[in-house]
Amino acid sequence: MTAEARIEDGEAGKLPADDGWWILNLSEIAWEAAEGNGIFCVFEAPSAPSPVLGIGVHVLNPGEANGMYHAEATQEGFLVLAGECLAIIEGEERRMRQWDYFHCPPDTAHITVGAGGGPCALLMVGAREEGRPIHYPVQELAARFGASVATPTNSAREAYEGLAPIVPARSPWPLAPM
């Protein structure tokens, strides 16, 4: 039988303290932010990250990208919970609106960018497999949003070098009306 996780108060909200089961509301869970890359929360204990599944919510204002254009060796998925975003997939731009889902097979180069008249909330999920590389190619369309590397790399450290640091942030939930 799996025990319930201990919940602790962190600098920016509540966090599970171990790998037990837990329930938290998006308005009370701890979030993080990086200037120009939105605000986000991850559904796992910082001390016990899942080796098989990453899942969380990312909120982007218009023009903010959720990271750098990349292709992962594992499957990902993105569901728009509110607002609009642009998905740049294999160099092509697609607009996504509330309840649109983007299935992202392994090795598909992509990034999402906030669009529309207000914040966009994305439920993001991805498989994890230790040792599987992430490739960051140069992509002209993504570069318009500051979301492309200047030189191709397989190093996240190189891809994110010089970008704003990740800092604790208070929950944006519920999102402001659009």
Image (cartoon, rainbow, N blue to C red):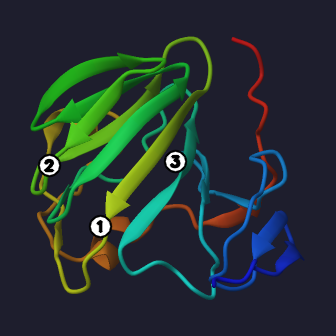
Q: Which amino acid does label 2 sit on?
A: Pro
Label 3 sits on residue: 37
Q: Is residue 163 above or below residue 52?
A: above
Residue at 45% across / 21% down in the picture?
A: 99
Quadrant of the rendered image containing residue 117: top right
Label 2 sits on residue: 105
Quadrant of the rendered image containing residue 119: top right
Q: Distance between the residues labelled 1 and 2?
A: 21 Å
Q: Can residue 147 be seen at all in this image of the molecule?
A: no
Q: In the depicted view, which residue is nearer to us: 56 or 135?
A: 56
Q: Where is residue 81 in the image (x, y as percent from the top left)?
A: 54, 28
Q: Where is residue 64 in the image (x, y as percent from the top left)?
A: 49, 37
Q: Position of residue 169 (x, y in %)?
A: 76, 57
Label 1 sits on residue: 159
Q: Position of residue 168 (x, y in %)?
A: 74, 65
Q: In the depicted view, which residue is nearer to us: 93 or 157?
A: 93
| Contact between labelled residues 2 and 1, with CB atoms less than 8 Å apart | no
Number of other residues with Cα within 10 Å of mark 2, as a class: few under 14, some 14 to 19, many 20 or more: some
Quarter occupied by the C terminus: top right
Side of 168 where 153 appears, left or right: left
Side of 37 where 45 appears, left or right: right
| Contact between labelled residues 2 and 3, with CB atoms less than 8 Å apart | no
Local SS, label 1 = helix
Q: Which amino acid does label 1 sit on?
A: Ala
